[in-house]
Image (cartoon, helix red, strand yellow):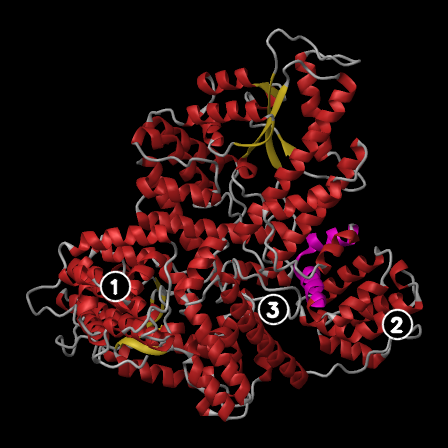
Amino acid sequence: MSVTEATRFSDLSASPIRPLSQAEVKSVLSDLKDWGREHAAIARLLGEDGPLKDFVVAAFTLSPYLRDTARIDPGLLARALAEPILPAIKAAIARARAAWRPDDGEVTEAVLMTRLRLAKREVAFLTALADLARIFDARRTTALLTALAEAATSAAIDHLLLSAHESGKLKLPDPARPSEKSGLIVLGMGKLGAAELNYSSDIDLVVFFDPMADVAVDPSEAVETFSRLVRRLIRIMQERTADGYVFRTDLRLRPDPGATPLAISFDSAMLYYEGRGQNWERAAFIKARPVAGDLKAGEAFLKGLVPFVFRKYLDYAAIADIHSIKRQIHVHKGHGEIAVKGHNVKLGRGGIREIEFFVQTQQLIAGGRVPALRLRATEPMLAELAKASWIDEATARELTDAYWFLRDVEHRVQMVCDEQSHTLPETEAELKRIAFMLGFADTAAFSAKLVEVLKTVERRYAALFEQEAKLSSETGNLVFTGQKDDPDTLETLKRLGFERPADISRTIRTWHYGRYRATQSVEARERLTELTPQLLRVFGESKRADEALLRFDNFISGLPAGIQLFSLLGNNPALLSLIVNIMSSAPKLAEVIAAKPHVFDGMLDPGLLAELPTRAYLSERIEGFVSGARHYEEILDRLRIIAAEQRFLIGIRLLTGAITGKQAARAFTHVADLIVAAALNAVLDEIEAAHGKFPGGRVALVGMGKLGSFELTAGSDIDLILLYDHDGDAFESDGAKPLDNIKYFTRITQRLIAALSAPTAEGVLYEVDMRLRPSGNKGPVATRITSFAKYQAEEAWTWEHMALTRARLLCGDESLMGEAEDIFRAVLARKRDTAKIAKDVAEMRDLIDQEKPPKDIWDLKLIAGGLIDIEFIAQFLALVAPARGAPQPEEVMPTADALAVLGAGMMDPNDLDTVQKALSLYTEISQIVRLCVDGGFDPKEAPAGLVDLVCRAGDCPDLRTLEAEIRRISKAVRKIFQATVRA
């Protein structure tokens, strides 16, 4: 539909979207009826059947956020129905820009915040409806959202400058136009700079000030004055009030954010970029644009940065570094299918970020010589790249179409609940919502289109980097025959990135001599010889290439045969990349492959990275593998083999970014649940065969700690409690070798611990910890249900009740599990003395601080404001919820989900948001670290590839930035912990 100033929603000839369900339709119609009592326009809409009514009803069934917005202010919907769309949005943006003006008396910060939030609500509401109606396309949506962000930021800056002027901190040249000649430079980065903001975007800002503008009354206080101003800017923009928020605001793209103030002087910034600026910062500044403050000073600053961003000569040397900017994405060309459910359309394979990097890479290489390649926005840049013959017209056209399609998908994901998410839902029902919002008839049609687009992007992106690789390096001499090293080969190895070329040459000669079983056949050696140049090139690209190649050597030395593997690697570059990735970043996984080459078989499954490791998926594989076992030891061996394989494959998905740390935690827990259940069944059969059944005997296993809350990592041990019961008048089992009740159930527990943790040729299943049972290590290993109930009611300490908030029944007798569940519920439902619980929790945290101080900032569990603080917040709230009349989670769930339930009624929303963000950050990093290395993460000792993975997990460009972010967020969490527990 062509859009004019007169276009209205009533111009719709048909609704482009369909409602989620008839039940939702009824609910929306009921709301509209209520709102129509006070708004004639809404009443008229209800009274007339037609495309407009169909559209509004469908939109509100699909987007809870839009419906809630209309519920808060039905007048918004009434105006939307009555007025032309574009003038209404432009008027709201104009109101936002003028919000600072003290026309009717003083404008306080609270008044400004309210004005901006109301303008944001109107623009977001109208823009979303117009976008869903296909009146606006994504180009117009992003432009209007950007205009709002600029207006709001400019208004806030004008207000703050005027406030500083009136308080005597600044002397402005013209208080009626505070920003002009103020020397305060506010640059919009990323999508704000490129005028491509997404629907629920945060805004990336960088703030500089020019001391030469001479506006600071005391120049020695300029940094503090402007930094305080920026802190207030962040509060104005992102603090959640009854009216919502304006934009989440991020200032981490400034120079060295962990060590610099929020506002930096013009000269300091220039010195930094000229002396220490990195390639990722060059890429970031391609899109930089003055959006508020002194716009002329901003333009002058960016002009001064041009030589830093765009080098004079063609910059192929930057390519490897550009690759490292792309840490969040892991391209595996052709390796497996792309999973639609749970796919991240921004950072995932074939996503928006790949298109942006496709463009930016070439801008960094050639922008210094070709000024036309310095544009900020993605679509015009693709056109310019085609015009300058850097890419062909077909590529530009395909990527442009893909870009806007993916932006549409991203917007729909965000319109559902106004969340800054880029990840598609993992359930069919929620995916249907997105498909309907995009106008598709069903999820199958949407999925087919999405996969087609993602594969197009992936193919074009991969082809670009293949071409760059050819341009920037040729392999050179590689000769590994004879006894002596070939000098040219050593030179080539050095050039490829190996620090000890003689050792590498000797290792490869070993392969050629057929000293390993995998290289004994002529065919295997021929395949390996063909593969060697590619192998060396790919290994050479990884940091600490020597270590990685020697791990690969260790791997093939343990293989029973090699021909199939070498053929596969030769024909499948993605698999080769995966192997190199493991060898260079995950020593622990490399050791698993070397010790148990059979786990490698699972990597050959083409669906590996596409299939989410759900409980059903894992159960099918584990049961299928164990079902053929004939006796006890064989069952346990098969459990060890399949557990190692499935944990390894979950690790591979995590390593490659196919699943998140949170998804990996759940998957590792599912594996443990299924393995423990199978082991318990085998143990019970074995005990019954030797000692018979115990009259009325029932057993149930309780998972505690991270096992209970679905938060296991690759290296987690498991916390268990075994509960039992039996007939009151029974004294011994009925088998050939009867045992009394204590011995019988103790024997079951001991056999189970041995089955899970005894080291065998196939390894250990899990280290088992049973210290969370009543009386800990002093108590019996098996606990009768009546004793357990009595202990919890009369003797348990506060920390034991905290542990009980994560107690989950794993397997065993259904009736006993039900009884145990009732006990847990009764204990947790008790109304407690909040002050006493708070005191106990605080003392316990202090004790941990004293007895187990954190080793360093990377000890995410123990640092102040780390994982323990967050877990304690959740457990404390769970225990005091009944006394405060707040809802408790109905079942055991991950800490993040438990916090969402408990925090909704007992925490400040901003605090809850901060804690959730911290938990997500810690989870992603911890999962990767525990997967790749034993012990903690030590940046000095960590494999280079692991450092990259940790940065990817933390969504930061480098370790310094990530460390600063951890320090910032942990400090905030510690304050929240203290405030919550005190409260």
**Quarter of the image where the N terminus is located:** bottom left
Relative image position of residue 491 (x, y in whole percent): 78, 79
Most extreme residue toward the left is: 104
Tag on residue 49? 1
**Tag on residue 526?**
2
Between 231 and 560, which is closer to the camera in this rendering?
560
Q: State left or right for residue 346 relative to residue 42.
A: right
- The residue positioned 52% from the left and 70% from the top of the image is 449
Up the image or down, 946 lies above or below 476; here it is above
Q: Quadrant of the C terminus?
A: top left
In space, the residues marked 2 and 1 are separated at their CA atoms by 74 Å
Q: What x and y, as percent, mark residue 708?
A: 54, 36
- x, y percent for residue 853: 51, 41
Under tag 1, what secondary structure?
loop
How far is mark 2 from mark 3, CA to CA? 29 Å
Verify CB contact (< 8 Å) between mark 2 and mark 3: no
